């Protein structure tokens, strides 16, 4: 198949998968106080932005120290990561996102783990490509199982 705009996203996804599979990350990524955030991936979608630029959206939910991050209805807060690529290989930018604002205590835990701060609306936090790859290659990244027993995606 000849390269075209529709295959750019596939190339970016392949580059991300290769980077994640080949890196030797830590077992877990934690804040200095030991706070541990896990991401339970439900889906990942690649968007071609044109000119060999692609964006990958990874959606799911988070837990903090073993407790699922829940909204007022008791449902998991939708969130995830996005990463931008300008060609095959590592991302050039990355950020964590939440579909709804959370309280200050939760926001502070995310900021401590990722060493960054949320935007003013509390929905987006730029984390940079290195932090994204470190987190995605750790045991903090899990597959979401609708039957409530999620499995780790990567066994390091």
Image: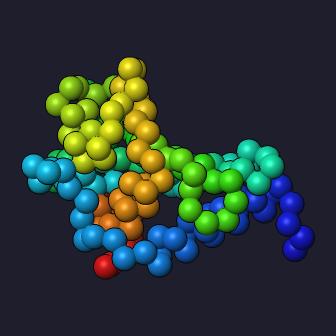
Q: Position of residue 123 (x, y in %)?
A: 40, 29
Colour convention: rainbow
Residue 156 locus on image (x, y percent): 31, 79
Q: Nearer the viewer, residue 66 or 110?
A: 110
Locate residue 103: give its quadrant.
top left
Position of 118 with respect to 21 (left or right) is: left
**Residue 8 placement: quadrant:** bottom right
Looking at the image, which residue is at 45% across and 48% down?
128
Q: Where residue 52 appears, x then y in whole percent?
A: 76, 54
Identify the residue at horizontal 27%, vertical 39% (top origin). 111
User: Can the viewer see residue 146?
Assistant: no
The image quadrant where one finds the N terminus is bottom right
Q: Across the whole image, how many numbered discs are drawn on residues? A: 0
Q: Give the vertical position of 45 relative to 121 (above or below).
A: below
Asked whether, in this view, residue 108 is left or right of residue 122, the answer is left
Residue extending farthest to the top is 120
- Which x, y percent locates residue 69? 25, 41
Mark yes or no: residue 94 visible.
yes
Question: Is residue 20 positioned above or below 85 on the image?
Answer: below
Of the pair 3 and 91, the residue shown nearer to us: 91
Residue visible at 27% across and 70% down?
A: 26
Classify residue 32 as left or right of residue 127: left
Residue found farthest to the left: 33
For the point 70% across and 60% down, the residue is: 87
Give left or right: position of 42 versus 69.
right
Within the image, what quadrant is residue 112 found in? top left
């Amino acid at each position: 198949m000849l390269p075209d705009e529709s295959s750019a996203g596939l190339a970016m996804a392949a580059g991300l998968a290769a980077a994640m599979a080949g890196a030797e990350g830590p077992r877990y990524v934690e804040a200095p106080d030991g706070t541990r955030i896990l991401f339970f991936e439900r889906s990942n979608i690649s968007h071609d932005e044109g000119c060999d630029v692609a964006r990958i959206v990874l959606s799911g939910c988070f837990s903090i120290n073993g407790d699922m991050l829940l909204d007022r209805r008791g449902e998991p807060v939708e969130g995830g990561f996005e990463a931008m690529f300008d060609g095959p290989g590592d991302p050039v930018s990355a950020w964590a996102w939440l579909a709804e604002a959370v309280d200050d205590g939760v926001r502070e835990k995310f900021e401590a783990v990722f060493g960054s701060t949320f935007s003013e609306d509390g929905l987006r936090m730029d984390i940079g490509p290195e932090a994204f790859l470190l987190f995605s290659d750790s045991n903090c990244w899990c597959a979401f199982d609708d039957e409530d027993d999620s499995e780790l995606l990567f066994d390091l």
